[in-house]
Image: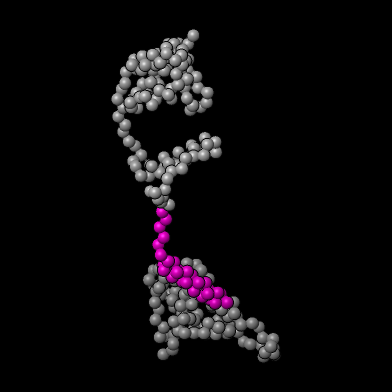
Amino acid sequence: MTKKDNLTLELPNFEGPLDLLLHLIRSQKIDIYDIPIAQITSQYLDYLKKMQQLNLQIAGEYFVMSSTLLRIKSQYLLPQNDFVDDDEQAEDPRDELVQQLVQYSVFKKISSFFKEKNEEAPVVVAKEPSISKDQKIQPLPLGQITEKELIATFAMIIHKMKLKQPSSVAIKVQETPIGEMISYLKDRIDKEGKVSFFSCVPRMNNLSDVIGLFLASLELCKKHLVVLKQNRTFGDLEIERKN
């Protein structure tokens, strides 16, 4: 019984025809630089036949390799020219296939090495830098931070807060009678002539009072009793009695 007849065909998950050839060579401890082309070709075709019997889908590249092996085998069957010196003999038809197998073997070893190192590497989890509780908060330098920088910083803070808290919350605001705030503004304007909106805010008890104060300012302006001035966007409001 020949070595070919003793070959046991297994069905591992090969990545291509070169991977299959390399498996056949290594499993039989064949020298990759001296491949018995007739034996390997027969084993390769038997493997494809076995896959077809199991109704496995075979990629076209496997059949391309089978034709290459048959071509190399046929070149060995052709009669040799006895009138040509040994030094002038044609190159070994196996050379190109051997080079492909050697290169594939090298890349496969490199791939296995990196895969092993990746599995051994510890899992790294990134975290945001933490600030010591003992560290004091430094005041912002005056005149060195622009409005765009402040807006970008505020947007970043809002984004971080959304990650820690629900995106929607409910705020209960108690209604404050606008009439009370109108009386409050009239009293201050009568005494001072004009009033800064921001200077009134610290005297308010809650958010509803601030909203009522703002609506009272708009109501007095609507009735042409006061004039509202704002020197810059998002700046303070000056509430002045209309002459």
Q: Residue at x 42, y 55 (%)?
A: 126
Q: Is residue 151 left or right of residue 77?
A: left
Q: Magenta includes 107?
A: yes
Residue that extends furthest to the top in the rendered view of this protein = 243
Q: Is residue 240 visible?
A: yes
Rendered location of residue 186, percent (x, y): 39, 13
Coloring scheme of the render?
one colour
Secondary structure of the magenta portion, mostly? helix
Span highlighted in magenta in the image: 99-127
Q: Is residue 172 left or right of residue 229?
A: left
When asked about the image quadrant of residue 82, the answer is bottom right
The correct choice, above or below, for 185 with respect to 91 in the image is: above
Residue 94 drawn at (x, y percent): 58, 80
**Where does residue 10 sit, x and y in percent of width and height?**
39, 77
Q: Camera-side residue: 95 or 103?
A: 103
Q: Quadrant of residue 137?
A: top left
Give the x, y percent position of residue 183: 36, 14
Q: Considering only vertical position in the picture, is 49 above or below 80?
A: above
Q: Residue at x 50, y 19 (%)?
A: 229
Can you say which quadrant of the picture contains the N terminus? bottom left
Magenta stretch containing residue 234, yes or no? no
Please say if 126 is above or below 67: above
